[in-house]
Structures are given as structure tokens and as C-alpha cells.
Amino acid sequence: MKTTQKNILTLVFIISLALLSACSEEQQNRLSRLGVTWLEGDYRITYADGEHVKIWLVKGGKVTSEPAKGYYYFWARNQETGKKYYVQTPIARSYIEELK
């Protein structure tokens, strides 16, 4: 690798670190989750553990996963009240289906 290419890569690395350190913790969290977020859409998330089964519908929302912690995160809507509530469910026992 030529010296100018090394200098450019070093400069890009330094600029990236400076920009990342200028971000708030919430912005850094959002950036780290970019690769593990399902695009906005309609989904059915099913949690199944033995005979216990729970199903949530996500309309026009997204599902975020954090494999290191082992959970999916999303906002579901209560069918009776229409209010949204936050859900986290274990990845190992959950299934996501995209509704069309």
C-alpha cells in the first residue's frame, strides 16, 4: 500500500472517530442498530414456549434485534384500546412473519 493511501485511510479513521465521539449515546445506539432493524412494514411476531403462545401484530412499524442480548424489540398496538406499548421478546423462542 502506498504512503498516500495509508495517509488517507488514517485520516478517514480519525475523522470517523471524531464524528462518532461527537454523537450522543442515543445516536450511537441508533447507528449500531442499523444493521439489525427490520424495515418498516407489517409483521406478526409469535413467541412460543411449550404451550404458551403469544402473538403481536406490528402495523407500519419496525422490529429491532439485539443478538448480543438475545431479544427482539418493537412497539405493538393493544387491539382493545389502540394504545401502543413496548415489547421485548427472546429471539430464541420468537418468530417474525412479514404480512403482505
Image: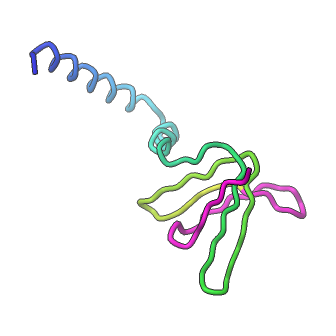
Seen from this angle, which residue lies furthest bottom?
51
Q: Position of residue 18 (x, y in %)?
A: 34, 26
In the rendered view, tell whether residue 18 sits above or below residue 96. Answer: above
Instruction: Let me know if residue 71 is in the magenta part.
Output: no
Relative to 83, residue 21 above or below: above
Q: Residue furthest top?
A: 4
Q: Quadrant of the N terminus?
A: top left
Outermost residue toward the right in this view? 80
Q: Residue furthest front?
A: 100
Colouring used for the render: rainbow
- Number of callouts in the render? 0
User: Residue 64, how many percent across, how many down?
Assistant: 57, 52
Residue at point 65%, 59% (across, down): 97
Q: Would residue 74 be found to the left or right of residue 60 on screen?
A: left
Tell which of 63 and 85 is nearer to you.
Answer: 63
Q: Which residues are magenta?
A: 76-100
Residue 10 in percent (x, y) is at 20, 23
Q: Nearer the viewer, residue 27 or 75?
A: 75
Q: Quadrant of residue 77?
A: bottom right
Q: In terms of depth relative to the viewer, which is nearer, 7 or 94?
A: 94
Query: Relative to 19, does residue 99 appear above or below in the rendering?
Result: below
User: Which residue corresponds to the image point at 66% horizontal and 68% vertical from the top-left?
Assistant: 46
Judge left or right: residue 9 versus residue 94.
left
Of residues 64 and 38, the one drawn nearer to the viewer in this rendering: 38
The residue depicted at 76 percent of the width and 50 percent of the height is 59
Could you say which quadrant of the image residue 76 lies in?
bottom right
Q: Is residue 85 magenta?
A: yes
